[in-house]
Image (cartoon, grey):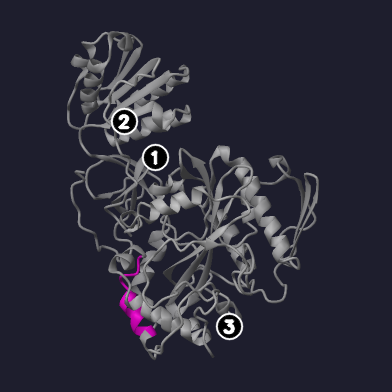
Amino acid sequence: MLITGIKSRPVYDELTPMQSGLRHVAAGQGSGGGPLVRLLGAMTPEQRAVTTVLYSVESFTGRNHLGEIGGYRTAALQVFPSNVEAVEGLDALLAGTTMGTRLYLAGSEGFIGTSMQVATRYGLNSDEVLREHAGSFVRRVWCAHCSHYTENVSRRVFECPGCGRHLVVRDHYSGRLAAFQGVKADGEVPGEMPDDEELDT
Amino acid sequence: MTTAHTTGSTAGHAAGFTPDESFTPEGEYRFQNSREAVRRMPFPFPDDDYMYSMNLEPHVPAGDGALRAAFDIDEHYVSECRHRAQMLEELPGVHYLALPHMLEAQWDLLELIFESYARDFPEHFTLTKNGNEWRWENRLLAIDDTFTFGDPSTLPMDPMEYATRQAQGEFVVLEEKDGTLVIGAGMTTQRADYSLQFNLGMSFFEFHGPVPKLHEMGILDRALKFLLRMKPGHPVRRVNWSLTVHPRLETSVETLPDWAPDRTKVTAENAGDLVHLRIELQPLHRLPRSNGIVFPVRTYLVSLAELVEHAPDWAKRMHRALASLDPELVDYKGFHRYHEAAVAWLAQHDDGAPLATGYPWNEGGIQPGTV
């Protein structure tokens, strides 16, 4: 079973204003505030006037860009204490949007992935969304055996809080589940573990 | 829907079928192939050296074995349908999934399977159409149902689930979207080492992500371009293969803790009985209404010992192909722990005689051999 070198991971973009947008939604988390600030700076005042910013201050690395974001005049700025609440806020916002909305996402892979699940539900096409990865490479992992989702996984091998098995994290990513795949690490011989390493890519 | 009979104890006693089989450890893997069943298989090694390729060819009837019908059935049909029902019951929501917008493709698939079975095996299946009122008779499973084509309320379950519970092999339906093919539905109780829950919604390049070399070899780009040009009524096929310890059909990622330990049990002495060649026949069809593509995987299991006994030349070929296999493929296919044992066991049955090249269903291709 291939663990590394799997080519199903998302390819990320760089956030730049989409000229075709009539209305913009920019959602970020933690270090993702950096790309949001850059995006807002690249926008015209007219574009910023039709832009709603959602920002979660939850961060794995401890970075907070709220001050810089707040320095821009936008249609609205919504601040959330956690990523889960920010994604819920995005859901509520997209429920009321119309054609011509463009979405910008920035932050951890888990945040971008769960936000994409919401965007897909509202039928946003890939050419209406830009995604920029920022900050740490912690991953959201789905356990293939008990279906538990674990946030912020930073090691190649970890213990699943759902079923207690040691899982090896494959570089295999499901957009629908917004997660990497975790499979029993010592599946063939109990106790025989693959090499552990920091997930830093 | 009206059901004259349900799948009951009278099912499966048609001549030539072996309904009392098991593909699970609980059933003690009660499974074997007749000589005829082995010699009709779509043997996947045309050369002594194996490297994968797209190897797509038009899916036209060839010979009187597995490639005669659009969707092949064999002596294991009844027991495989029973196994599917058992797997679906044991792990609901894991082996059968369909995205909400796939309903039209589901009806396409039901029609394709039922029409093909009725045409190719009229002694077992009959499809009678009166406009959209259809009657489906499956004598092997003692089913006689009527339903309205296109109206899901006239079936007890999704059309795809209904049809594929009565079909051998697994079925993945791909939808065409943004210039690629995306997994929209699947009935995969026989899948080899992947997760349908995880792969649902993935694009062609994403779900091929774990296969080594394909990207570098440029195979995927060419395969996708080819598939996107497919037209209804012009199916294509390819064969693939792997190895499985025991005649176990269900080897999904989800249940890996149950079956992966078996890989450590193989020795050069018991490999003949434990190691099974897993042949996958994949006849792809474009679906007419939905414009989807169905990717079926019809799996044939045969032990190395059965190959030697019933198809000695195929056993020799397999020895050579396995012995020279690229280590990266050995790892990907998951048998690095018992690769050597399987090769050593097969070596005893290979005299080194030259063998024909080409698939057995092609003229001049390798035949099973004299027994």
Mark 3 on the same chain as mark 2: no
Q: Residue at x 38, y 21 (%)?
A: A102
Disc 2, SS: strand
Label 3 is placed on what type of residue? Answer: Arg
Label 2 is placed on what type of residue? Answer: Arg
Disc 1, SS: loop
Q: Residues within 10 Å of mark 1 (few under 14, many from 20)?
A: many
- Quick check: A107 left or right of B209? left
Label 1 is placed on what type of residue? Answer: Gly
Which mark, by number, is residue A175?
A: 1
Query: For the residues marked 3 and 2, what is the alpha-carbon distance in whole angstroms?
Result: 57 Å
The residues colored magenta run B334-346
Tag in front: 2 or 1: 2
Q: Residues within 10 Å of mark 3 (few under 14, many from 20)?
A: some
Residue located beneath label 3 in the image: B35
Residue located beneath label 2 in the image: A131
Dominant secondary structure of the residues highlighted in magenta in the image: helix
- Examine the rendering and report whether any part of residue A36 can be seen: yes
Disc 3, SS: helix
